[in-house]
Image (cartoon, rainbow, N blue to C red):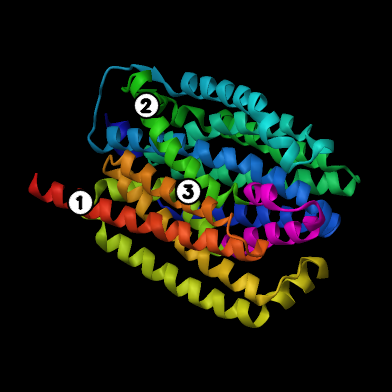
Amino acid sequence: MAGRARAGRPQSVLWVLAATVVSGVSGYLVIWLVARSLGAADYSVFGVFWSGLFLIVGILFGIQQETTRSTADSVAHDIDAPVRSSMWVFAACAAIVVILSVGVTAILWAPATLGVDNVGLVVQIALGAGGNAVVATISGVLAGAGLWRQLAAIIAIDGVLRILSVGVVLGAGGDTASLAWAVILPYPISLGLVFLFAGTSFQHFTKSGLAYRRLIANSAQTMLGASATAVIINGFPLLLAFFALATEKAELGALILAITITRAPVLVPLMALQSYLITRFTVLASPWRLIGQALALICIVMAVLGAATLFWGTWAFASVIGADFALSTSALVPLVVSSGFVGSLCVTGPALLARGEHRSYAVGWVLASVVAVGMLFVPVSLEGRAALALSLGPIVGLVFHLAALRSATRQGRRA
């Protein structure tokens, strides 16, 4: 019991923030190195692979949210329920289902997005996603138990290993398939290293009082919301690839990179702090003060970055990455602004999950995703459709989330 209480007090979220910086910098160094090496047209293939992998990773983040919530709830209320499930068994089963699902469905999306010559990348996507299913499950346990150092170690090691392995492959003149292997190998290695050196500190928390049926049901709801989240955040470049013409490969590559880079300052820290936000909202009587502070900060960052992009965006892309990646400010500024709308959903979502409002969380993200996909059919340029989708979709989802939170807090006060 004492061990539970002690683990439940977060030593410092600064560990996770520091690891997020390391991971974020490493990830964008990977993107920068690969883009400079391949050029816009060839980068479009790697960009779609990256998007496909992290689309699934984003969906699996729903598992991390649920294991965070269930573990945090058990710690906060000092629950010693009978053990009904093992998070390790749950993680292994999830990994198998993910690998099989990617392999079976690949024929529906791989040829049209990766290209017929690159469908072999499905193997790396499937195995990488399967490995991440295990990482997501255990990361949620660590976050829910307040073991921030161990969680930070997984995040940081993963990022460092990825930039090192990609750097080695590029130095050796490896092809896109080799780069894909370099991207996915850090998943099992990072978790394995943390388990090897600190496994005893969290093994107790991997035993859950939730039955597998309840764990699966809750995870399914959060994964539904996470799938819609992932469509907008991680998988959007993959969607764009469906709408790009064969003659627009260079434009697609430049647009994929621009979307990835412009949203980074807002979304990278917010996505890394999702588990922390769920934990914080779980112990707050009212979520509104924290939500207000977070949204105000997002607005300030969005305004500053939008102004900077207006003056120096095109120049920065041309100078740092390459002239073939330089889009106009009319394309870049809307992408920067849209990141604030998406980021706001990353605040209201954890607030809903912390109150057990899984359905409202999911519906908000689904609405955002459906509207975003609908905007891709608007007969304007590829750049225009991207900006419309990433702005209007999240705005609709945000309005729904805020309304659902208002209703939930009113019911809580009545109770």
Pointer 2 residue: 217
Tag 1 near tag 3, CB within 8 Å: no
Q: Residue furthest bottom?
A: 311
Determine the secondary structure under disc 2. Answer: helix
Q: What residue type is disc 2 on?
A: Ala
The N terminus - image quarter: top left
Q: CA distance from mark 1 to mark 2?
A: 23 Å
Magenta residues span 237-264
Q: Describe the element under mark 1 as helix, strand or loop.
A: helix
Could you tell whether 9 is left or right of 299 in the image? left
Tell me which corner region of the image, top left, top right, bottom left or bottom right, holds residue 265.
bottom right
Q: Residue at x 25, y 21 (%)?
A: 81
- How far apart in space, not on screen, are marks 3 and 2 (Cα)? 23 Å
Q: Which residue is mark 1?
A: 407
Instruction: Give amino acid for label 1.
Output: Ser
Whole-percent x, y for residue 296 in the image: 37, 70
Callout in the foreground (1, 3): 3
Q: Residues within 10 Å of mark 3 (few under 14, many from 20)?
A: some
Point out which mark residue 370 bears. 3
Q: Is residue 80 above or below residue 234?
A: above
